[in-house]
Amino acid sequence: MLWLILFLPLASFVLIVFALLKRHTLAAGISVAAASLNALLTLVAISHPDLVAGSSITWLALGGFNVEIGMQWDPLAQLMTVIVTCIGALIHIYSLGYMREDPCRARYFGYLSLFMFSMLGIVLASNFVMLFMFWELVGLSSYLLIGFWYEKPSAADAGKKAFIVNKIGDFGFLLGIVMTWCVLKTINFQELKSVVPAYLASHAMDGGAALSTIAIITALLFCGAVGKSAQIPLHVWLPDAMEGPTPVSALIHAATMVAAGVYMLCRIGFMLDYAQETLILISWIGGLTALMAALWAVVQDDIKRILAYSTLSQLGYMVMAVGLGSSGSAMFHLATHAFFKALLFLCAGSVIVAMHHEQNIWKMGGIWSRMTWTTATFFCGMMALCGFILSSGGLSKDEILFVAWNTNKTLFTVGTVGAFLTAFYMGRLFFVAFCGGPRGDAAEHARENGAVMTIPLLILSLFTCALAWRKGFLVDAIHLIGGMHEVKAPGLVHILLVVIPFVGFATAYAMYAGVGEKDPLSPSLRECLATKFYFDDIYDWVIRNIQGAATWILGLWDIWVVDLSVKLSALGVLVLGNLLRCFQTGNLQTYVIYLGLALVALIYWGIIHHCPL
Amino acid sequence: MIPLEHWIIVSSCLFAIGVAGVILRRNALVVYMSLEMILNASNLALVAASRYNGNLDGQVFAFFTIAVAAAEVAVGLAIIVALFRLKQTVQVSDVTTLKL
Amino acid sequence: MLFLIIWLPILTALALMASPIRSARMARDAGMACMALTLGAALYVFFHASAMNAEYTFESRAPWIPSLGISYHIGVDHLSAMLILLTSLVGTAAVGVTPLPKENAKYHYALGLIMVGGMAGAFASLDLFFLYIFHEFALIPTFVLIGIWGAERRRAAAMKITLYLGLGSLILLLGLLGLVWAVGGRTFDLLEIKRMLALVPLATTTQVKLFGILFLGFGILISGFPFHTWAPAGYGEAPPLASMLHAGVIKKFGFYGLMVVAAPLLPDGFEMWKPWVIGMAFVNLLYCGYVAMQQSDLRYMLAYASVSHMGYAFLAFAANTHLALQGLALFLFAHGLSAATGFGIAGFCREKTGTSNISEMGGLARKMPFAAAVFTMVAFAGCGMPGFANFPAELMIFMGSFQRCPWVTVAAVWTAVISAVYMLRAARNAFLGPLPEKWISTGDVDPVRRAMFALLLAALLATGFWPRLVTDGGGAAATYLVQQK
């Protein structure tokens, strides 16, 4: 059953790429059918666990290094599979409407199927190597989809940037996997659960060397998550990734691929338990990302960028939760975030299409009266993102902040400030783009898009309500992972967390309700935050100057120093030849002299000295 | 009797003059004459030695030398004539087409 | 069967040269027919040999110069069968992909066929003399191919590559002769020498000297730093027929020689020279990788990329564990295919656009979607994307080498990032982006060439998805494990 779920999208991809690149409707249909079928099969597999048989194929087996292609179907995997397939199916359906007029949509749906295959592979993987393989494939799908409109220079550049930044993270990740196998002799997650404590026990006399090895391994594995989930300092690719079509941003860069990092961290949670230093590192990186991304989001003018930075920020919360020791709350937030963020992106897409691909919020306005369904669903999603009471996001974010309260008060403050900022910038977005009067022709004429695009919005908005998270499979899975209502915090904290979103929203209302064409935020503040703290610029500078200089020097070294000996040998031969040339004068008498000299030499050495020649 | 050394010295002088001529003179015919001189010098040495030793070996050998010299002159002069027809010159220093 | 693989291309080449064929297309069709037969035979030999594990099959022996102990002894085991399969695959594709020459077409294809036959013979040869001779068969035609049908700087490039590799072969010959002389000078046969050395190994000093000479000779052939400068000019100016065969196959010969001749017969020498091998690996990986980033010509970049990737192979060779050697064998196969595809597509683009300069080539994906797709695949294979055989190979190399050489393994993993940078940069600048005016009328890949690229990529993907095709019967690589004292 699981094999079918995994390979159905691959079959769709292969079929589209080899046969259907010109038959756009057919390709779209096949891809959507595959995705929907996957969603159904997942739900069946969840409700009928007896249908799921464990089996694996040996992919490589050499001298102790065994790599299996096999599935792990524990609650964590089940939760993620449901998220991926269900949201995936909805986004496929939405894409039918969004990409309706695109001349290359067959290719788009093919890539989308490839992505589903890769993501499901990550989720179902039973060992590190299989995880890494699909991790890389997800990176490939992301490259292809971000750069889908490849003739646009910014899109092509963004795709390249995303892949390379991810690859840098994968450098650490792969080293971590190599070390895992070399030190612990296995890469299978189930086996590692028992091998790690055994290893630590057998090396307990080492004086901490074994513990630091585990810490190094986990830190390296975390690098992969930093790259994939766009944590600081490898966050620079995510905002640029908005060059891709909006459904892609929704699926890949909000709901699923970026969540893969968090998922992986939860998978290796049993290892992280032994690595305190790594956990501290993880929580701080998560916290910093959450705060900084929220600050940057305040000054963005492109609707997709605002949502991108908000994704960065929420991912920071999830990573912080893992670092604080609570994988359960991280997964909970991942689940709720997947739904409401996908919803928000799809709403944004709906607005963008209605506005003929205008993405600047300062050109929008008055959408609420023209596209009521979109506005309503957006509002639900926004409530969830800001963490309002009675929304799903509120439950999960509060969970994380309770954990922070109990473990690290500094990070709690960071998280709370982040929550305030979240409400603030989302309020800003809402009031500027959706409320007030239209700021231009496009906004004037925006109309609701068809049912194909609106129905997924409605379905997703159902999940933003907290009531949806009281009972049901998703909740059980999360409980099994270890999340939800397990942490206690003083009542004051509860009240604080309820009030903060309102405060943020109210501030936004005060500043942005009924505002005109310009952002009333002070220009110097805008300047400061718009620099994004120079990360992009520093990287650019390093690449251009340091790496550029290094490669320039090495290039010249190669031509003028290493190759020099080759050139010198050629030169030497020429010089020698020119020297010997002097002996060939062409003059008869010179040759006579040579003859004479040779004769004298012969006589001297041959006869007088009796040398045998 | 004139001692043998005198003959050998004269022969050597002739030989040296001949070699000097071959190496230093530029006219091909003069080079040839010097070559003849070298051969004659060796003839002289041979005959003198033969007379001194009292047998005829040297003189017989001298005959061989004369025959070889004659043949060589015939061929050599033919070459020089052909060379003159080609290059209009018999100066050895003008014929350097084998120079690299 | 081996006889067919080795001699059919060579005899066809001779027949082609003697024939009055004038049309390039007919010459190409003749070449492809011959290669198709060779490929079939190679597949048969490969599957048969992998079933036989580590023993030699298809053996045949005929005395050549009995007084010197030289005999025509050929046979394959799993490793050589795999490399012969690689030769046939790359050869078939190369003959199909190379641009149709404007004049003297029959000589072009004939020389290519001689190269294929020569390499097949070199891999199948079990006699040291013939090992060398067959390699020369492959080397000499590159001079003519590059010198006549190459790009702008072909004369200089042809001279450089031939003289440099000729020097390398000469050193190799000296090493081989030294080895033969050290064992008594009676026989050139590899298997007999192996037996003799198993009983009475050579003195350590002799081993060190001989291994040094052989390593230098093979190292020049493999483009190990600092003897790699023939590669950029040579591959950069060569027609695809030459560059595909050279980068794909002939470079692998060096490693084959090291694995089969040098290391097992001279274990103490290998031990002494290991730090140099490791150093070479490190420098090749990082230095050549960074220099590749600097290149503005697509083919020069691919040349440096291929030199850089040889570092992975040096690393695996130095690490000398079962897993690493297995990875090395698969890597030779995978890299051969991906490098050949890369040079093939670069050559095709040069044929269509007249330029190899990356920045001049921009925006071609709209007009040449198939070519763009192939290049993207080559780019991703080059940085170790799963799905291509390069990934399992590199993974095995990393896993196998980490404990022996941790820091060089770190450098090797970083090289994957470097490769991603320059490959994707090239893909972005050459294929993506807006289409400039001048390329409006370029066409995409024609069906014959599509089939050839599909052949190479299919082999790469098949072994990538199911590496056990090549690694099963994988006891073979382990037989070359040098026993540590």
Image: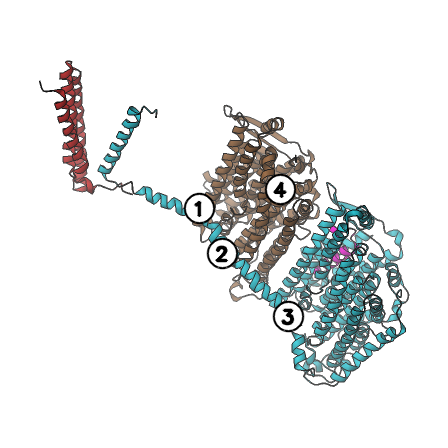
Chain colours: A cyan, B red, C brown
Say which of A342 and A596 sits in front: A596
The answer to the question of whether label 4 and label 1 lie on touching residues, with beta carbons closer than 8 A, is no
Q: Distance between the residues labelled 2 and 1?
A: 22 Å
Task: State the extent of the magenta-drawn residues as a range.
Answer: A110-131
- Residue A512, position in %: x, y? 74, 83
Q: Relative to the observer, which residue lies in front, A208 or C213?
A: A208
Q: Distance between the residues labelled 3 and 2?
A: 31 Å
Tag 3 subunit: A
Spot occupied by residue A479 in the image (x, y as percentages of width and height): 88, 61
CA distance for labels 4 and 1: 31 Å
* SS assignment at label 4: helix
Location of the C terminus of chain C (image quadrant): top right
Spot occupied by residue C360 in the image (x, y as percentages of width and height): 51, 62
Mark 4, residues whose alpha carbon is within 10 Å: few (<14), some, or many (≥20)?
many
From the viewer's perspective, is residue A110 above or below residue C28? below
- The residue pinned by badge 1 equals C159
Q: Are labels 4 and 1 on one chain? A: yes
Chain containing the residue with disc 2: A
- Marks 4 and 2, Cα distance to the nearest angstrom? 30 Å
Q: Which of marks 4 and 1 is in front?
A: 4
| Left or right placement of residue C256 versus residue C146 in this view | right
Q: Which chain does tag 1 point to? A: C
- Magenta-colored stretch includes residue C93: no
- Label 1 element class: helix
* Residue type (three-letter) at the residue carrying disc 3: Tyr
Q: Is C32 positioned to the left or the right of A162 in the image?
A: left
Circle 3 is placed at which residue position? A534
Q: Mark 4 points at which residue?
A: C317
Q: Which kind of residue does numbered mark 4 sit on?
A: Phe
Viewer can see residue B80: yes
